[in-house]
């Protein structure tokens, strides 16, 4: 499907993001470039569904969209699997399904043994081992 943006307007504090028409075809890569504060992150948040579109529309299958924050935003009071599944919980995916999805990703990353741990430092240390 890809992503299609039509007549988008979004006000953030004093800044106004405006995009008349943008189409990103499925399987193609695009790069957002611009100075700090120009709306790159805001646009990504709108596409990911983390912000509500005020005017215009974004047509996208959000099941095909992933979003990684610029800063490490892990919740220290949650286990590894709960952190991995947090976005699915916010999307109101039932617990059994989100745990199944989360375990799939932990297995792909070869960190399934860390599922019930709280110390996220363990995950970082595991990733460093791979590098």
Image (cartoon, helix red, strand yellow):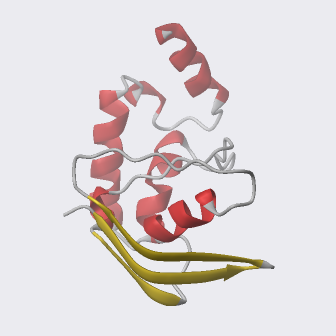
Task: From the viewer's side, name the closer residue of 32 and 63.
Answer: 32
On screen, residue 34 versus residue 15, left or right, reads left
In the displayed structure, 51 sits above or below 108; it is below
Quarter of image, res 115: top left
Whether residue 53 is situated above or below residue 99 in the rendered picture: below
Asked whether, in this view, residue 25 is left or right of residue 17, the answer is left
Residue 81 in the image, given as x and y percentages of width and height = 46, 44
The residue located at (69%, 45%) in the rendering is 76
Residue, far left: 1
Q: Quadrant of the N terminus?
A: bottom left
Residue 88: % across, % down = 41, 62
Q: Nearer the viewer, residue 45 or 98?
A: 45
Q: Front-most of 44 and 88?
A: 44
Q: Nearer the viewer, residue 57 or 91?
A: 57
Give the image location of residue 32, x and y in percent.
Answer: 52, 50
Q: Vertical placement of 61 versus 120: above or below?
A: below
Q: Quarter of the image holding residue 105?
A: top left
């Amino acid at each position: 499907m890809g992503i299609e943006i039509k007549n988008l307007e979004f006000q953030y504090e004093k800044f106004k993001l405006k995009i008349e028409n943008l189409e990103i075809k499925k399987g193609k890569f695009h790069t957002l470039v611009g100075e700090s504060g120009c709306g790159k992150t805001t646009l990504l948040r709108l596409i990911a569904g983390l912000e509500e579109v005020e005017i215009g529309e974004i047509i996208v299958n959000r099941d095909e969209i992933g979003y990684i924050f610029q800063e490490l935003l892990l919740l220290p009071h949650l286990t590894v699997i709960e952190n991995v599944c947090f976005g699915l919980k916010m999307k109101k995916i039932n617990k059994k399904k989100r745990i199944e999805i989360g375990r799939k990703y932990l297995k792909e990353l070869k960190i399934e043994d860390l599922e019930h741990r709280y110390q996220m430092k363990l995950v970082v240390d595991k990733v460093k081992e791979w590098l």
